[in-house]
Image (spheres, rainbow, N blue to C red):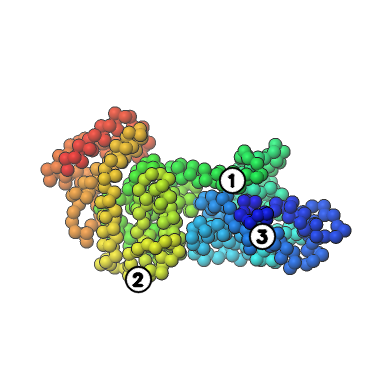
Amino acid sequence: MSLNAKLPPPAKMPLWPELGKSFADELQDYSPTSVLDGISAYEHEFGRARLIERLADLLHVNRAQPGPAHKEFCTLPFDIVCTTNFDFLLENQYDLERQDNRTAHPVVDEDQLSINIGTAGTLLLKLHGDVRHPTRLVVTEADYDGFLTNYPLIATYLANLLITKTAVFIGYSLDDPDFRQIWQLVASRLGKTRRMAYAIMVGARPGDIARFERRGVKVVNLPGTREKYGDVLAEAFADLREYRREHAGPTLKPTEEKPLEQFLLPRDAMSRLCLFATPLEILPYYRENVFPLAEAAGFVPVTAADVVNLGESTSAKIDTLIDRATVMVVDATSPYTQFELGLAISRSQEVSTRLNRLPLRVIPVVTEFSQLQGAGQSISAIRRPQTLSDESEFVWQIAKALEAIAEEMGFAQRYEPRRLFETKEYRAAVISAMALLESTLRQRLNKPPLESVRRPLSMRQLLDLAVSEGMAIDYQDVLVWTKLRNDVVHRGKRVSRQEAQAVLEGVERIMDAI
C-alpha cells in the first residue's frame, strides 16, 4: 500500500527488504542475515532515538502523501482496519476523504481499546505502532519477541477479530512473527471451523500463492506488475465499492414494511426513502412529531436503528442507507450525526453523477450553526431549540422543506414506474406504481392542518375516503394490485409483464382522473 504514496521524484517508498538494506548499508563490518537482524543491529549501534529518526526519514513521513490506492480504499466502509505500517498515509487519506478529522480513530496503545470517545468512522488499529510512539514501535527482534508479553490485550483483541470476522489482507506477507503466532494459535484451536481469510495480491507468483494457501489464506490474484501496483489496487477498490453498493440492498432487513419495499427497488431507481440521522436520545421525539410529516409529504421515514444489517458493519449500513435515500434529515448535534452529515453531503453529488438520478437532498438541523463546521461546504440549516416541545417551530420548517422537495420531485416520481417497466424491472415497477398511488392519495385526501397529522391513514382508509369523495377508483382492482405488491415484497413473487402492465396502466388511469 505504501508504494502507492505520492512523493517528489526521484524519492519512493521502500519495501520491507529495501528498508532493511538501507539500515544495513550504514553498518560497518556487519552483514545482517535478515531485515530484522539489520534493524536490530542498527539500534544496538546507534540507539533507539536515532533508529526512529532514520526510520521516519526513510519512510518520508513528512513528505509522503496518499496515492490513488489509499483514496479508493478509504471509501470502503470498513469499521475496523488493522495495519502494521509505521506511516500516516491512511490517517491522512481518511481526513481528506471525509473532510472531518474524526472519521479515522487511530489506536496505538492498549488503554485506547476500552475508551469510547464518541468518534464515528473507522477504527484504525496500528498493530506495530508508528514513529510518533517510539516506545510502542515494533521494529526490532526484541520488539517482535516481546509483543505477546508486552501487549497481551492487543494480541487478544486481534485474535478475537480473526475468530469472529473474515480477514482480508492487502499488501501483507504474513511474515511478521508476532502476527503469525496469533494466526497459528487461532488455526490450532479452531481447526476446520476457522473462518476463511483472503489476500489481495497483484501479479503473485505460484510460489507466493502456495505459501499463502498453506497458511489458510485464499489469494485473490489481480493481473499487473509492481510498477502498476497502486493503479491496480485503486481500480480493484473502486470496483469493490460499487459492487457492494449495487448488491447491498438484500443485506439490509428493515423492521417495517414500507422501507422494505423501497430497498427492493433497483439502485438507480428513485426511492421515497427519507433517512433520519439523530442522536438516540431525541429519536423518539422525531418519530412522534416529524416522521408523520415526512409520510404526509409522500416519503418513507427510516433510521439506521430500523434496519438490521446482516453483515454487522455499521459503516456499511450507513453507507447503503445514504446511497438508497432520496432525502436525509440530519440532526447534527452530536459527533456521530455531524460525521453522517459530512458523509451525506459528499455522497450527494457523487450519487447523482454516477447513477444519473436526482441528488440526495440533505436537511441539516442544528442548535448552533457552529455544528455545521466540517460539513465540507457552506450549507443552510434549520435551527431547533435545545429543549424540545410539541409546539417547536422547527418541526414545521422541516415539514415545509419536505413538501418543497416532494413538489420538486413530483414530475420525475410520476413517470418512475413507467421507466422501470420499460427497463423490464417488473417487480420494481409494481412497487413504484403502488407507492405513487398511495402517496398521491395521501397528499390529496389527508389534508388536515399539520398540527393534527400524527398517524397517516392506511391504504384501505385512503381508498374508503377516496370512494366517499367520489373519486374514479375501482376499489376491487386496487385491492388486487395491493395484494400483488404485498406478495412481491414479502414472498419474493415474480411478476410477469402482463401483471405489471395491468397495475401500471390502472394506476396511470387513476392518476389522470384525480
Look at label 3 and name its amino acid: His
Q: Which residue was labeled with disc 2?
A: 386
In primary-sequence order, the first of circles 1 and 3 is: 3
Q: Residue furthest right?
A: 29
Q: In the rendered image, which quarter is residue 477 located in? A: top left
Instruction: Tell me which numbered mark, 1 or 2, is placed earlier along the sequence.
Output: 1
Residue at 15% in and 39% down: 472
Q: How far from the left and from the top, in percent, is residue 442?
A: 22, 49
Q: Nearer the viewer, mark 1 or mark 2?
A: 1
Circle 1: element type: helix
Q: Residue 31: give x, y in percent of width and height.
A: 85, 54
Residue drawn at (69%, 48%), measured in percent from left and top?
174
| Label 2: few (<14), some (14–19) or many (≥20) C-alpha neighbours in 10 Å | few
Spatial separation of the CA atoms under disc 1 and disc 2? 49 Å
Q: What is the distance, in whole Å, between disc 1 and disc 3 at their CAs? A: 21 Å
- Please give left or right for residue 503 compared with residue 120 in the image: left
Q: CA distance from mark 2 to mark 3?
A: 47 Å
Q: Earlier in the sequence, mark 2 or mark 3?
A: 3
Q: What residue sits right under mark 3 in the picture?
A: 60
